[in-house]
Amino acid sequence: MNVRDNATLGRFELEEKGLIVFANYHRSGQHIVIPHVEAAPALRGTGAADRLMSGIVELARRDGFRLSPTCSYARIWFRRHPDAADVLAGVAR
């Protein structure tokens, strides 16, 4: 998995072609709110944000935290990937 948790900046990051796509977060225990996802302009339209979100879901499953996406991109991503709903806050496992 290439997604890393940059706790210092409060964001998950994925580096591709020397550029970063990231998702800012706010953590409270095992609950993480994602208010913003952003890709470097050269990565937009390449699927980098999709790969980032998939990696975040993998981290959530591995580490046992729950996600609340408030960013419009992240909310839409979860609607398009119902198989990832198990990591959403408020969803029974």
Image (cartoon, grey):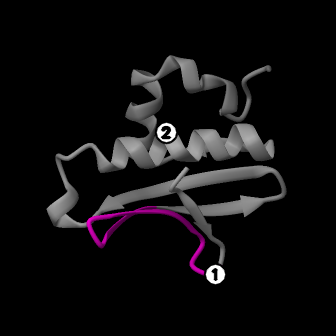
Magenta portion: prevailing SS class: strand
Residue at (43, 58) in percent of width and height: 36
Question: Between residues 26 and 8, which one lies in front from this camera angle?
Answer: 8
Counting from the top left corner in percent of width and height, residue 41 is at: 17, 65
> What span is colored magenta in the figure?
8-22
Q: CA distance from mark 2 to mark 1?
A: 22 Å
Crowdedness near tag 1: few (<14), some (14–19) or many (≥20) residues, C-alpha within 10 Å: few
> Judging from the image, what secondary structure is the residue with disc 1 in?
loop
Amino acid beneath label 2: Ser
Q: Identify which residue is drawn at 26% across, 66% down.
A: 17
Which quarter shows the C terminus? top right
- Rate crowding at label 2 as few (under 14), some (14 to 19) or many (20 or more) other CA atoms within 10 Å: some
Q: Does residue 9 lie above or below 47 as drawn? A: below
Contact between marks 2 and 1 (CB within 8 A): the answer is: no
**Where residue 14 sits in the image (x, y, percent)?**
43, 60
Question: Does 87 sit left or right of 77 as displayed?
Answer: right
Asked if residue 16 lies in the magenta stretch, the reply is yes
Residue type pointed to by label 1? Thr
Q: Which residue is mark 2?
A: 54
Residue drawn at x 68%, y 24% as measured from the top left: 86
Instruction: For marks 2 and 1, give the one nearer the viewer.
Output: 2
The quarter of the displayed image where residue 90 is located:
top right
How many labels were placed on the picture?
2
Q: Which quadrant of the figure has residue 84?
A: top right
Residue indicated by mark 1 = 8
Residue drawn at x 17%, y 46% is 45
- Judge by depth and name the residue closer to the eye, 84 or 18: 18
Give the answer, above or below, for where 89 lies relative to 37: above
